[in-house]
Image (spheres, helix red, strand yellow):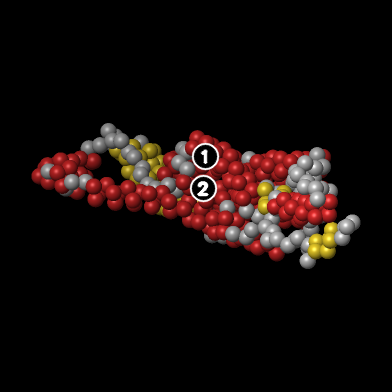
Amino acid sequence: ASVATSTNLDYTLMFNQTDNLVGAAYIPNPYISVMTDLMNSAYIKWQHGVSVLRGVKPYPTLPVTTNISIIGLLALQVLTLSLHLLIPYFLVKLVADRQYKIREQMEAHGLGTSVYVGVMFLFFFCFSMVAMGIMYISGLLFDMHVFVDTSGPALVYFAVVWAVASVAFTFFLAPFLPNERMATVLGWCLVLVLCQTKSVYVFIYPIDKVAAWAALPSIGGGQLLHIMSEAESFTLTDAPAEFWQISAIVLVSSVLLFMLGAWLDHHLADIVSSVKSFIKVHTSHACDIEAVTPPLASARATSISMDESREVLAHKEMLLDMAKLRVTYPNPGGAPKEAVKGINITGYSGEILGILGPNGSGKTTTIRSLLGAVECSGQIQGAGSELLHTDRAHPK
């Protein structure tokens, strides 16, 4: 409805309004000014008989304010990049411990897998919290809005959520990386890819959109960070429901990724080995097997009986005789860890003695017991001399 007089034009303009979101700024519908010009031009022509060209001079309008801040967005980008810088270090540490047998040596000395995983998770978590503390101090010095106008408990909560998510993510990725070099390259590539993925996501979708993509630490953590930065003063008591929903998605997915990563760390090598064996068996041809396998007659011709073996060994000098060798490590708060369980080994002159076994079976500990590096029990004779014959002592 409109009311027009010789001195005044009063009308209500109704239209279907859809906010145009560009980044973090809301741009008004461009058709509003066009329709306003048409109404005003019609009124002037009716009253004075003069046509007014649209666009020559804009009519007075209310100021339009946007909530976009270039400096604020750049600060969030730098902060997001800083949060991701620890991921390559965590990946390299986990992969290097496996590649250089550091973890295997610790397990051979009695360190359990669960203890190793728990200690490394706690170490990475504390490292992340210290890094967040340094970022908080830097943010206060540079008067960053997300640090200055956010309550302390909210910042601590965000730091805990991000630390858990990033550490769990690295534990999930580490079993797939074979060596330290690949972990380094992939880690830094992930830093760039994840940061850009977060930026594109929060640019396209509303920052408080609750979706499954929040399970990815970069997206979920980035949404939480943007929600805190958008508020004039953010506290946990005034946090929107979307903040808690996104936090729940991030934490639940982190627990699942961590558990899956721990399982893959223990079983992935066996799975890959089984797949390779399956492929090798089913791709081999009968002719190839016959060409590689020696004839049965040859095998029988070179085999000797047990009595013949004893007769041959009787003419050789026994250089090493190890019987019932045991190595046990104390385990505070639990049962002692038995690294070597009553092994018997005999070596003769003119022979090459090899000790075979899977990781953690006690091969290195056996050699160290011969060198006197660890306490052991049992009987050891070398070149006819008794080196050990006691319940528990250092070899001579």
Vertical relation: 180 (above or below) 110: above
Q: Is residue 105 visible?
A: no
Disc number placed over residue 80 in the picture, else none: none
Disc number placed over residue 186 in the picture, else none: 1
Q: Earlier in the sequence, mark 2 or mark 1?
A: 2
The kind of residue tagged 1 is Leu
Q: Nearer the viewer, residue 136 or 331?
A: 136
Q: Position of residue 58 (x, y in %)?
A: 80, 45
Extreme residue toward the top, this view: 350
Q: Is residue 291 visible?
A: yes
Q: Which residue is mark 2?
A: 173
SS for dot 1: helix
Q: Nearer the viewer, residue 90 or 312?
A: 90
Q: Position of residue 196 (x, y in %)?
A: 60, 43
Which quadrant is the N terminus positioned in? bottom right
Q: Position of residue 328 (x, y in %)?
A: 50, 52
Residue at x 52% of width, y 51% of height: 172
Could you tell me if the residues under marks 2 and 1 are in contact, i.e. CB atoms within 8 Å? yes
Answer with left or right where residue 216 lies relative to residue 208: left
Residue at x 55% of width, y 55% of height: 258
> How many numbered discs sit on the rendered protein?
2
The kind of residue tagged 2 is Leu
SS for dot 2: helix
